[in-house]
Image (cartoon, rainbow, N blue to C red):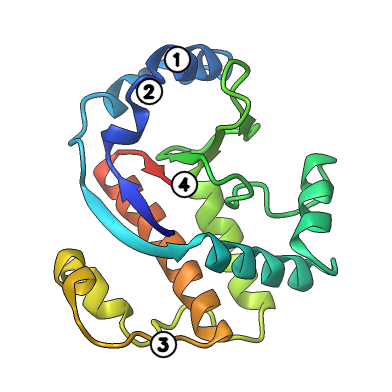
Amino acid sequence: MGSDLIVGRAGLEGLETSLTSHLAGLGLNDDLQRLFKTDENVATLCFLNIASLVLFLDHVAVVEGYPASNIAFAAFERGESGFKNFPWWVNSIWLPFDFEPRGNLEDEPTLFVGSCQGLLRELTDLKQRSPLGLGSAPNGYERMRQDIRAFYREDTTFQLDDSDIIRWMWRALFDGAESAIEAKSALWL
């Protein structure tokens, strides 16, 4: 099953009350109001699929010194991981302002809410620590960024090795967070 990263307001629909309550406790009411006024869909980035996300998180775990992503996730839950804004949940939203703590909504415990700025810092840290040349765009990525609809309609075989998949996931998260900050909108998975 494919997955996309979306920059825009659409991912916030139905969450206004929960997000308002969560962020009010962080003193971010003013920032939140402008999110509900942004364009519904600013950008869409192909995030490959859930298996690709697991591969990416397994790489994150290894870079951080854990043998697998499930152990790294447990470390994250204990507050021991340095990657607090990564997509440890399939349902994740990153907001275009810096705040702490990141975490789940009380009334939506399966939804992670993080910071785009925090995500960018952590992705930069991962890039510096990873041996995979993160930051470069793998084959097909630029085509996807130019026109995602045409990319999805292409009839060509699309093959990526594990390192390319990890680079793709890193690049999509980085580009998505930058786009969300620029558009003053949310990034969601």
From the image, state whether disc 3 or disc 2 is nearer to you. Answer: 3
Q: Nearer the viewer, residue 175 or 145?
A: 145
Q: Where is residue 157 in the image (x, y as percent from the top left)?
A: 31, 88
Q: Tell me the quarter of the picture where residue 25 sits.
A: top right
Q: In this view, does 148 lie above or below 120?
A: below
Q: Where is residue 65 in the image (x, y as percent from the top left)?
A: 84, 69
Q: Tell me the quarter of the picture where residue 148 sits.
A: bottom left
Determine which residue is flagged by label 2.
32
Query: Looking at the rendered structure, which numbered label has been put on residue 159?
Result: 3
Give the mark, 3 or 2, whose residue is nearer the N terminus.
2
Label 3 crowd (10 A; few <14 / some 14-19 / many >=20): few
For the residues labelled 3 and 4, say whether their Cβ atoms are less than 8 Å apart: no
For the residues labelled 1 and 2, say whether their Cβ atoms are less than 8 Å apart: yes
At label 2, which amino acid type do we have?
Leu
Q: Residue at x 30, y 46 (%)?
A: 7
Determine which residue is flagged by label 1.
20
Q: Where is residue 169 in the image (x, y as percent from the top left)?
A: 48, 68
